[in-house]
Amino acid sequence: MLSEISIRNFAIIEHLEVTFDQGLTVLTGETGAGKSIIIDAVQLLAGARGSQEFIRHGAKKAELEGMFTIDDVNHPVFDKLTEFGIDCEDGSIILRRDLNANGKTTCRVNGKLVTIASLREIGAQLIDIHGQHDNQELMQEKRHIHLLDQFAGSYLTEAHQNYLDIYRQYTKLKRRLESANENEQQAAQRIDLYSFQLKEIDNAELVIGEEEELEEEKLKLQHFNRIFERLSTAYESISGDNHALDWVGSAMSDLSDAASIDKELESHSEALSTSFYTLQDTAHELKSIIDRMEYDPTRLPIVEDRLAMLTSLKRKYGATVEDILIYREKIADDLDRLLNRDERIGREQEKLVQLEKDLEVEANELSIIRKESAQRLEEAIMRQLKELHMEKSTFKVSVSRKTSNSYDSNGFDDVVFLISTNLGEPLKPLVKIASGGELSRIMLALKTIFSKHQGITSIIFDEVDTGVSGRVAQAIADKIAVISTHSQVLCISHLPQVAAMADHHLLIRKEVKENRTTTAVAEISDVERTKELSRMMSGAEITSLTLQHADELLTMAKNRKITFR
């Protein structure tokens, strides 16, 4: 539910903080006091389009912040938060939006910057706003199928999942086949290209690690004389005419003889012995290497040509030999598919035909469930319309096959809500209902049913009761109260019958401070509620009779609400 909202420098509101509770909260006040401005602020928090005109005159920016508390750990909003990488540990969700005078908008959810589109997706899971001319879902025929599916419940959800599993395979395969039916000339060109590239790579007989070995060999060939001279000098220094190795051998013998007498010299004797034998082995190794060394003047150009070829291949096919070989496997697979495309396409077309048959079965199952659910929904809505004194109306849920005979993620059904509000009039789409009063009552009838299934935490009604009175007004008040038993409801109303049903009554007043108009909100006591209802019934003048009538209305509302819980 919406727990609290903070508004700064928004329209005529300088600073306002309002706390909300569960149940039905009614906002009343004189025209122009700022009731709808509060709803505008909530709409912007939910991602509605904003503009600089909302910023209070003289301010640099408007600041809006709302905190929502979600008790249901399985609420779909948490999936949205996870999708956008937003943390939410304690079930509290804080939406913030700043409108700047330079036209820029900043949106945050739990402190993380998000786009307006992301804010809108999250807000749609939290808030459902209905106005006299803004009944979003009802006025979008494409949403009717989702409303019917929500009403159908888990029975349809399971069937829909079975359908979706096949539908995803079907659409993926269909896209692949459409892509395969490319221009034959293009396919031939790709076959030629891949064949050439494959031959060029295979002819190179690439070996992983070869390039590093060639670079080392190139370096040795380029410095052959230098290496030969240094090895020869080193060998001569150890075993040449200066008899260095003989002197070390003599020293080893002398120290060994001394160590046989003085045990403290044993470690030094052993170290010198190790050094002598190491030098002796090194001398033999150096002599062997020198004897084997032979300069081949033809080898360096071969190595350099091979390295140049590898560089050319890397420039074409990959940064390393490993990358080139990976690319080679890819084009080999692509070439195989192109060369065998007719056979493969034939197999996949057969599979597509089978998937389409499976889709037909599952979509038909969905359609059967929808038609059964549509009858139950029609009966439920008709009962609600009768209670709203629209007993002469006829409500129909049309479930028909798409004219294009195609499939989408919902099957092959088109779902449209139809209604006739007067006897003898034909059924026509709900979206073409012209009367605002009728549309508001139809919306309340539908909302009474759907509020149990949608999981929306906060439903806002903005003057949906305009233009009605008498028994219809009481019926609307009853419906709004019933909806509030399943979801938090905030309602702006001019009807005393609706205000009397409130669990919490907020009075909106317009005040003037320092020659500036601003809006104030306060929850009113029982005595003040009686006065406010009296004002709503009679206008500016409050009489003892209207006060008595208001008191009776509150008592009646209290008794009626007991039956709704």
Image (cartoon, rainbow, N blue to C red):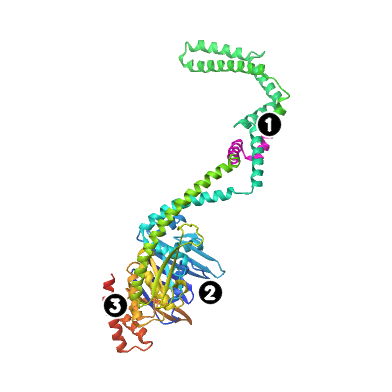
On the picture, is 350 further left or further right than 160?
right
Mark 1: amino acid:
Arg
Instruction: Tell me what residue is drawn at x 51 percent, y 60 percent.
Output: 404
Residue 326 colored magenta? yes
Q: Which residue is mark 3?
A: 557
Image coordinates for residue 541, horizontal then vertical, percent: 36, 89
In front: 455, or 445? 445
Q: Which mark is residue 306?
A: 1
In front: 317, or 531? 317
Name the N-terminal-most of marks 3 and 1.
1
| Neighbour tally class for label 2: few under 14, some 14-19, many 20 plus, Cα within 10 Å | few
Q: Nearer the viewer, mark 2 or mark 1?
A: 1
| Location of residue 496 with respect to 274 vertically, above or below | below
Q: Secondary structure at mark 3?
A: helix
| Location of residue 82 with respect to 334 vertically, above or below | below
Q: Secondary structure at mark 1?
A: helix
Q: Which residues are magenta?
A: 309-335
| Neighbour tally class for label 1: few under 14, some 14-19, many 20 plus, Cα within 10 Å | some
- Visible residue check, residue 125: no
Asked where in the image residue 553 lies, by quadrant, the reply is bottom left
Q: Which mark is residue 290?
A: none
Q: Which residue is mark 2?
A: 53
Asked where in the image residue 518 lies, by quadrant, the reply is bottom left
Q: Is the magenta region chiefly helix, strand or loop?
A: helix
Image coordinates for residue 104, horizontal then vertical, percent: 55, 66
